[in-house]
Amino acid sequence: MVQKTRSIVLLIVGIIAIGLSIKCFTIDDLDYETSSMYGGDAFTGIQNAAAITSKNVKELAGIVQFGFGSVLLVMGLTLVGLGLTIPVGTQESTSVSTPEVLEEAPVAETPVESPAVEQDKAEA
């Protein structure tokens, strides 16, 4: 049950991410101000500075759109792939396997002495 729910959620989120990436790639209504000439020097300088700034902002917005669109697309495809690879219709096995118990070797009741100790006892 948990795997089926997880699979459905991953598929839905992946499809939403792919849709948002398509939306991000198709935004093209950004515009920028053009340069123009006025009679006074101050107004012309301010207008041209604003025009350059707006053009730079438009170019930056295009870069950001491509970056976010790419991340959303890759994330969406990954989530859809994960959602499809999780088995939807399989049942989890409820049988529990019991581990085999290893037999322990019997422990000797008499202490084992080293050959050097036995040789000292023999000499005494």
Image (spheres, rainbow, N blue to C red):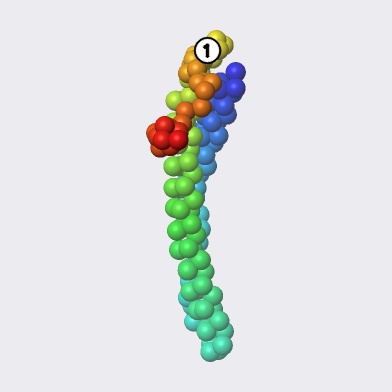
Counting labels gives 1
Q: Residue at x 44, y 42 (%)?
A: 74
Question: Element at badge 1?
Answer: loop
Please say whether residue 18 is visible from this viewpoint: no
The residue under label 1 is which amino acid type?
Ser
Residue 24, x across and y down, in percent: 50, 47
Viewer-nearest residue: 2 or 95:
95
Please say whether residue 9 is visible from this viewpoint: yes
Q: Residue at x 55, y 81 (%)?
A: 46
Crowd class of label 1 (few under 14; some 14 to 19; many from 20; radius 10 Å) = few
Q: Residue at x 48, y 74 (%)?
A: 52
Residue denoted by label 1: 97
Q: Eyeballing the image, is 36 above or below 28?
A: below
In the current view of this chain or complex, which residue is farthest to the top?
A: 95
Q: Eyeballing the image, is 7 above or below 73?
A: above
Q: Eyeballing the image, is 53 above or below 103?
A: below
Q: Is residue 119 left or right of residue 54?
A: left
Q: Residue at x 50, y 17 (%)?
A: 106
Q: Is residue 124 left or right of residue 92?
A: left
Q: Eyeballing the image, is 119 above or below 39?
A: above
Considering the image in quadrants, where does the N terminus appear?
top right
Q: Quadrant of residue 9?
A: top right
Residue 81, x across and y down, in percent: 44, 31
Residue 86, x across and y down, in percent: 48, 24
Viewer-nearest residue: 59 or 99:
99
In the current view of this chain or complex, which residue is farthest to the bottom?
A: 41
In the current view of this chain or complex, which residue is farthest to the front?
A: 124
Considering the image in quadrants, where does the C terminus appear?
top left
Residue 27, x across and y down, in percent: 49, 50
